[in-house]
Image (tube, rainbow, N blue to C red):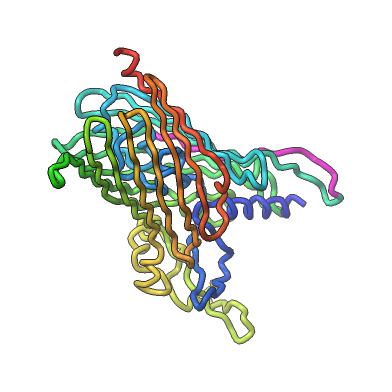
Amino acid sequence: MKDKIYRVLLALMVLISPMGLFAQEYTDVLGQRLNTITTAVPFLMIAPDSRAGAMGDAGVSSSPDANSMHWNPAKYAFIEQEMGFAMNYTPWLRALVPDINLSYLSGFKRLDDVQTLAFSLTYFSLGEINFTDEAGEFLFPVKPNEFSIDVAYARKLGEHISGAIAVRYIYSNLTQGQFVGSIETKPGMALAADVSAFYTRELNWDRTPTIFSAGFNVSNIGNKISYSDEINANFIPINLRLGPSLTFLLDDYNQLSFMVDVNKLLVPTPPIYLRDDNGQLVIGDDGEYVIDAGRDPNRSVVAGIFGSFTDAPGGFKEEINELTFSAGAEYWYDKQFAIRAGYFHEHKTKGDRKYVTLGIGLKYNVFGLDFAYLVPLAQRSPLENVLRFTLHFDFDALRQ
């Protein structure tokens, strides 16, 4: 029965993955072959805060805030406040289960005019799962969970540009040390780093003061993760995120921002394996499945990163299909009330996530609240009909 439960846990991770995973059966849909990319610890790719979550998961070039760690740590170098932090809560799969959620705590402290330190903690709980024996009798409960701890250093490199490096410890305990057959499982652990840059400057757009910004972040550059010494390790979601934004300062009370993010996973694309006339996978002389198109995904992290731009079995067209796009807009009135909207798009052969997002933000003195709501347009989303919450604190307001 433990073996069955282990498979259920893995299936659950596939279901909650933000990549919209499918079984790697390469099913044809409208003449196009599904070939989604899978990674371990997909919780690292979930938008943790309500502000970016309300703007279609766009945030690499938005104005800096306490939650910039996930989107682009280099933004911290241009943050106006001396110190602040935020608490975020995201219910997950509420239409199916009551106790899966993502919690995110982040904060920052300016060291001087050019340097900022920041931290964050992400905790993903899969709720409680009851183990039973072969007769269906209750044995004991388990509470699978995952978390990551991040620290970042951001520095201005010039009047308009900054850079940052973040380091991350990742811990994933899905099986609680249970045996799968004769194989003992263990928590998966990894160390990773982010490298990011941010550019911002004020311009004039038809006599309207305008802030142009652009961001770049390669996140989760780290070792593969495994849940057993006898099972092959899997890539973590190494990701390239980049995009621009424009903020129009309409007058002393009104400002309007538009932004776009483009994402590309820097991990191997699954190849297409050769099958015989009976539809069975062909095994080569080396004991491995024979690849019909694409490249062997079992390669080093460095080879996986650089090879991710050219390894799709469908060639350049499939590489383009692996890009995801986020577009968002944000309106602020008197820096106290915000309205946000966005759209997220993923190709139908790579997960088919398409959704519209909405949200509002309120700021009063020291405290601020953000809310986000998601409306799926294609497949159902784990965040469907769920409100997401962010509470943030501005300590500079205490001194005023």
In this view of the protein, which residue sits in the foreground, 220 or 43? 43
Q: Residue at x 26, y 23 (%)?
A: 111
Specify whether residue 137 is painted magenta: yes
Q: Residue at x 31, y 48 (%)?
A: 259
Residue 39 location (% of width, % of height): 49, 55
In this view of the protein, which residue sits in the foreground, 332 or 153? 332
Main secondary structure found in the magenta portion: strand
Residue 121 location (% of width, % of height): 46, 33
Chain part drawn in magenta: 136-150
Q: Is residue 105 visible?
A: no
Q: Residue at x 22, y 30 (%)?
A: 252
Q: In the rendered view of the protein, which quadrant contains the C terminus?
A: top left
Q: Quadrant of residue 207?
A: top left
Is 56 above or below relative to 273? above
Residue 101 location (% of width, % of height): 58, 39
In this view of the protein, which residue sits in the foreground, 315 or 139? 315
Residue 144 location (% of width, % of height): 63, 41
Specify whether residue 262 is painted magenta: no
Label tally? 0
Most distant residue in the bottom direction: 277
Tell whether 325 sits left or right of 202.
right
Q: Is residue 91 visible?
A: yes
Is 271 above or below relative to 179? below
Tell whether 3 sits left or right of 322.
right
